[in-house]
Image (tube, rainbow, N blue to C red):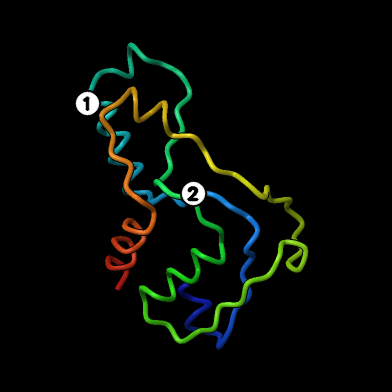
Amino acid sequence: MLRLMKEKESIHVVNDQFGCPTYAADLALAIMRIIRSKKSKVNPGIYHYTNAGITNWYEFAVAIKKITGSNCIVNPITTAQYPTAAKRPAYSVLDTAKIAATFPVEIPNWEISLEKCLSLLK
């Protein structure tokens, strides 16, 4: 998004695919806390981790535009208007209740983590 917003006056971003962005630094911190807690040995299983909050790709791009102060125009489109070879789910939100209840992890909101990430890239 950053590159596209620098190169183009306007971009089109799908607004009907919902998910939870995940900041890699938050995920790494959660993994380290799980390892240090030693609970992973007594609570094996499948756990989902994403940042808190649900958004779509369009809203995510608009947040990036706002945080960076970009002048690029972000236009919403549907998945049907942006055909790709790979099929994308309309709703790919993961439930993080199990990991939050089992391990001492923090799950920050995606918008807060996006601001942290973008501030490091400046």
Cα–Cα gap, marks 2 and 1 = 26 Å
Q: Position of residue 106 (x, y in %)?
A: 28, 39
Q: Position of residue 6 (x, y in %)?
A: 47, 83
Choose between 77 and 121: the one closer to the eye.
77
Report the side of 72 relative to 68 (left or right): right
Spot the residue most to the top: 42
Q: Position of residue 37 (x, y in %)?
A: 23, 23
Q: Residues within 10 Å of mark 1 (few under 14, many from 20)?
A: few
Spot the residue most to the left: 36
Q: Residues within 10 Å of mark 2 (few under 14, many from 20)?
A: many
| Quadrant in which the C terminus is drawn | bottom left
Question: Mark 2 vs mark 1: which is more N-terminal?
Answer: 2
Which residue in the protein does label 2 denote? Answer: 20
Quarter holding residue 43: top left
Q: Amino acid at mark 2?
A: Cys
Residue placed at 73% from the left, 53% from the top? Answer: 86
Q: Are marks 2 and 1 in contact (CB under 8 Å)?
A: no
Q: Amino acid at mark 1?
A: Arg
Q: Position of residue 53 (x, y in %)?
A: 43, 49
Which residue in the protein does label 1 denote? Answer: 36
Residue placed at 36% from the left, 73% from the top? Answer: 67
Residue placed at 35% from the left, 30% from the top? Answer: 100
Q: Is residue 70 above or below residue 27?
A: below
Quarter holding residue 29: top left
Q: Secondary structure at mark 2?
A: loop
